[in-house]
Amino acid sequence: MTQAMKKIVLLCFTLLMMAKTAMAGELNLSVAASLKEVINELTASYTAKHPGTVFLKNFGPSGTLAGQIENGGPADIIISANTEWVDYLNNKKLVDASSIKTFTYNSLVFVGKTSKKVSSLKDLTKLDKIAIGSPKSVPAGEYAIAAITKAGLASQLTNKLVMAKDVRESLMYAELGEVDGAFVYKTDALQAQKSKLLFTVPQELYPRVVYPMAITIKGAKNDDVKAFHVFLQSDEAKSVLSKYGFALK
Amino acid sequence: MQLTPEDILAIWLSLKIALTATAFALPFGFVTAWLIVFKTFRGKIVLEVLINLPLTLPPVVIGYFLLLLLGKNGWLGQLLNESGFPIIFTWKAAVIASVTVGFPLLVRSIRLGMESIDLQLIEASRTLGASWPDSLLTIILPLSLRGIIAGSSLMFARSLGEFGATIIVAGNIPGKTQTIPLAIYDYASSPSSGKMALTLCMISVIISVAVLLLHEVLGKQLDRRSFL
């Protein structure tokens, strides 16, 4: 080995060691995309009080997050947009069962900027195109399909549905006017600039939108993780959640 | 291996979109490559940059631009909507996305083929009385065939893999605009359908290998012909 190569190897090794020590106060969060603003605000306020803690946040569709954890992705806490994926991880013994708590609730609404009068699910038959999240991978889309089916409108609406890759993409289509309206969460509707909330989907038509959170087996050994898990259940967290339109009960 | 009817539609749709995109882009690609290789004109560098732009831009950017251009409020979209030819959220939007993303690859390969043509051959044909369309069709076209085949297979393969631009302009509608990559994305987003995702991944590999093999075989045949 030449002298130069030795130096490079040594340098790489030192960098690796440095990376290892820097990881001490690091918390890896895997969070459903719809909670992005809330979690950003909560982690910022937590870091202000605990300067040693650094957050690495991974936002994405809940199913993808669960898949990443199953395949060994680094996560200490997962907050999912439905119970399905936390249950899935629990069945595989990848999360600490005693740490599973409900973080918050959300509800399904319909937004759009159509000039037609739309005030209930039945009025959707008047529209041409309706955006929903792809039901196979997006929980909001699954809830929308459940509501449409229970209202007996499935056969009339199927051809009007445009499947988007997530809730935010459905909202974008509605904002641009490419679709007459979109099924999104109430919290997304509050972010809309051009489209308005046309109606709230009656709760009896679809399962409750619950956001469960859990500490992973890997995170359970870390006291910092437990402290943040407690912080997520505090009054401060609750007030941030209601500020963004999430329901606490 | 188990495929749902929707998966089969996705495979069929992917092939249809990639084939249409390649066939549609081919004549334009040939003319563009010819312009760049054999012609000098003002603004040539602008043309080159414009053609290669989709190669360097993130596909999501292209998808978003296309959505704005072809959408209800875009000038082209308005025109098309009025003439009863809506594009957004149809398989045609996926074709346009594929054409935009694959076009630079097509032009690049044809260009390489044309650049290797001995200029004296073209000049000889002209001095022997061939008009330029004549020498284009009888000298340039056959001699750049290798580049055309390489470019077409590259573009076909790129179209099969198109994801970023397609999921924005065409959406992810099973049976209508859901191609293989979009279906895989759907499956991969829920860990419980990992097997379905893998099945489609395998099919993706099989199609890609078939395209590459076909490309090699065609290239070999062309070589043999030119030796005779």
Image (cartoon, coloured by chain):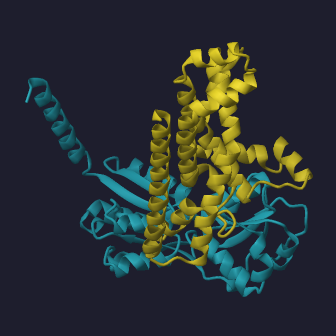
Chain colours: A cyan, B yellow
Q: Residue at x 24, y 66 (%)?
A: A221
- In depth, the one of B33 and A18 nearer the eye is B33
Which residue ends up furthest to the front in the rendered image? B228
Q: Is residue A12 left or right of residue A101?
A: left
In the rendered image of this protein, does residue A4 appear above or below residue A108? above
Please state the horizontal and vertical placement of residue A243, each as a whole percent of the image.
61, 60
Q: Is residue A144 left or right of residue A19?
A: right
Q: Is residue B126 left or right of residue A73?
A: right
The answer, for residue B5, to whether it is visible in the render is yes
In the rendered image of this protein, does residue B16 appear above or below residue B156? below
The answer, for residue B33, to whether it is visible in the render is no
Which quadrant of the structure image shows residue A227? Answer: bottom left
- In depth, the one of B124 and A88 nearer the eye is B124
Q: Is residue B51 left or right of residue A45?
A: right
Q: Residue at x 36, y 57 (%)?
A: A28
Please state the horizontal and vertical placement of residue A103, each as a whole percent of the image.
49, 71
In the rendered image of this protein, does residue B160 appear above or below residue A4? below
Which quadrant of the structure image shows residue A154? Answer: bottom right
Please state the horizontal and vertical placement of residue B93, each as a whole percent of the image.
72, 53
Please state the horizontal and vertical placement of residue A46, each as a whole percent of the image.
41, 54
Q: Residue at x 50, y 40 (%)?
A: B222
Q: Residue at x 83, y 58 (%)?
A: A113
For the N terminus of chain B, the quadrant is bottom left
Q: Number of marks in the image?
A: 0
